[in-house]
């Protein structure tokens, strides 16, 4: 049965669930967003949410940006040259945002920078610390930065990437994180900033951790997150899916997932599946004309524009050795839904196709509302 046809029995239909007066669309599940920092309400014509990437020289900022947004193979980052100017990169994706890569040697406290302009419209500060190197100086800079930010934009999300952890043992990774958290908490408390909320992530460009960390950073900037989670929860329970992710295809950032816990293996297999499907599509897929998109290319399209939702007709299924099924469905030109489910659940393929179609229509409405 194709996605467009209705199965007779609608007991598990997502549409019925969506029409239920107990409101899926208006009542976000308790969000993971902290009380202090939060998503930026998207206003028509508002500037793109900005992410600042800061850290010491050679801490890995440009590598992160190149691997996540330019699909650069991690080993090629060895040849990246040191950044000398602020690199401003518009990222055209499911949500338009900008990444500003700050050269490690810049001291923006020296009076020559307009700090208000830098920090005021910023959604998140990502501060990168090289965990394979001596990090005390990096911490001092981090603490100064946090204090500066409190003056200009206290609602900014502060995200610390404890980076290059690929070279460290599990114990050492956790010890390093504990040490960094402790020193930062103590220092800020001493200076009277003990209410500042900071998120810490262990990252490496050599595995999925950098994509997962970026996913969490971006999710906090999405005003639609609660609604997306609700819709995914409805889909998961109506189709008996084990786990569902909504991925931004080109960056492999997951925009939302249902509220069951994310285990790294499910995330990794879904993320790898995107690579497989993308590679196959690039080689053997038909020419989709103007739907082809360069994620970094500056364009006028914004989320929810009509052309974003055209031709959402790609899907793919893979049966795994362990009796599970991977199901990928293109939602629009930026987003894909990837589900992991048991073989038995996938037998109701018609119902799944139908509910995914309803899910897709709901997403379109959500993004239209927030446009
Ligand atoms: N082992 C390891 N090396 C990394 C990782 N990320 C980046 N690197 C390496 O770190 C070095 C410096 O990376 P860059 O991205 O140039 O660092 P940067 O922070 O942009 O440096 P500046 O432009 O000088 O501010 C490169 O040789 C990268 O290959 C990682 O996750 N693990």
Image: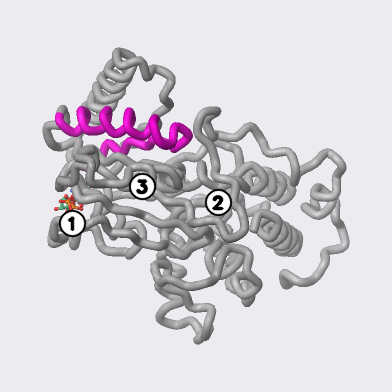
In the rendered image, the quadrant that contains the C terminus is: bottom right
| Residue drawn at the location 22% of the way across and 29% of the way down | 139
Q: Label 1 to label 2, Cα distance in Å? A: 34 Å
Q: Nearer the viewer, residue 9 or 314?
A: 314
Q: Secondary structure at mark 1?
A: loop
Closer to the chain start, of discs 3 and 2, is: 3
Q: What range is drawn magenta here?
A: 137-166
| Residue drawn at the location 69% of the way across and 48% of the way down | 231
Q: Badge 1: how crowded within 10 Å, few (<14), some, or many (20+)? A: some
Observer able to see residue 371: yes
Closer to the chain start, of discs 1 and 2, is: 1
Residue that badge 1 annotates: 83
The spot of residue 143 in percent (x, y) is 27, 28
Q: Is mark 1 within 8 Å of ligand 1?
A: yes
The spot of residue 13 in percent (x, y) is 80, 53
- Eye-nearest disc, 3 or 2: 3
In the rendered image, the quadrant that contains the N terminus is: bottom right
Q: Secondary structure at mark 2?
A: strand
Residue that badge 3 annotates: 118
Labelled pair 3, 2 in contact (Cβ < 8 Å): no
Q: Badge 2: how crowded within 10 Å, few (<14), some, or many (20+)? A: many
Q: Which mark is residue 245?
A: 2
- Eye-nearest disc, 1 or 3: 3
Q: Quadrant of residue 63?
A: bottom left
Q: Label 3 to label 2, Cα distance in Å? A: 33 Å
Q: Nearer the viewer, residue 240 or 85?
A: 85
Q: Secondary structure at mark 3?
A: helix
Q: Nearer the viewer, residue 109 or 364?
A: 109
Magenta-span inclusion, residue 286: no
| Residue drawn at the location 87% of the way across and 62% of the way down | 8
């Amino acid at each position: 049965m194709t996605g467009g046809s209705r199965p007779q029995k609608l007991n598990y239909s997502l549409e019925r669930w969506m029409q239920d007066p107990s409101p899926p669309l208006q009542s976000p599940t308790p969000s993971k967003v902290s009380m202090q920092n939060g998503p930026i309400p998207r206003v028509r014509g508002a500037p793109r949410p900005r992410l600042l990437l800061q850290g010491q020289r050679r801490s890995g900022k440009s590598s992160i940006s190149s691997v996540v947004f330019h699909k650069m193979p991690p080993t090629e980052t060895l040849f990246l040259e040191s950044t000398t100017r602020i690199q401003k990169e518009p990222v055209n994706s499911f949500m338009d945002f900008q990444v500003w890569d700050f050269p490690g040697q810049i001291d923006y406290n020296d009076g020559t920078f307009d700090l208000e302009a830098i920090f005021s419209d910023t959604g998140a500060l990502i501060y990168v610390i090289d965990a394979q190197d001596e990090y005390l100086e990096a911490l001092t800079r981090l603490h100064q930065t946090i204090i500066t930010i409190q003056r200009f934009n206290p609602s900014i999300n502060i995200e610390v990437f404890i980076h290059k952890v690929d070279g460290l043992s599990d114990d050492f990774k956790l010890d390093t994180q504990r040490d960094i958290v402790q020193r930062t908490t103590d220092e800020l408390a001493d200076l009277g900033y003990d209410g500042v909320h900071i998120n810490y992530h262990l990252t490496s460009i050599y595995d999925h951790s950098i994509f997962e960390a970026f996913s969490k950073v971006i999710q906090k900037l999405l005003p639609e997150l609660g609604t997306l989670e609700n819709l995914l929860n409805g889909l998961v329970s109506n189709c008996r899916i084990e786990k569902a992710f909504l991925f931004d295809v080109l960056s492999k950032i997951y925009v939302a997932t249902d509220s069951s816990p994310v285990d790294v293996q499910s995330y990794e297999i879904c993320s790898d599946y995107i690579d497989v499907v993308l590679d196959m599509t690039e080689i053997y897929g038909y020419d989709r004309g103007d739907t082809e998109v360069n994620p970094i290319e500056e364009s006028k399209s914004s989320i929810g524009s009509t052309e974003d939702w055209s031709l959402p007709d790609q899907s793919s299924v893979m049966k795994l050795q362990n009796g599970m099924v991977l199901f990928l469905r293109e939602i629009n030109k930026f987003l894909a839904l990837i589900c992991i489910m048991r073989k038995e659940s996938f037998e109701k393929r018609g119902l799944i196709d139908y509910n995914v179609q309803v899910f897709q229509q709901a997403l379109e409405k959500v993004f239209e509302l927030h446009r």
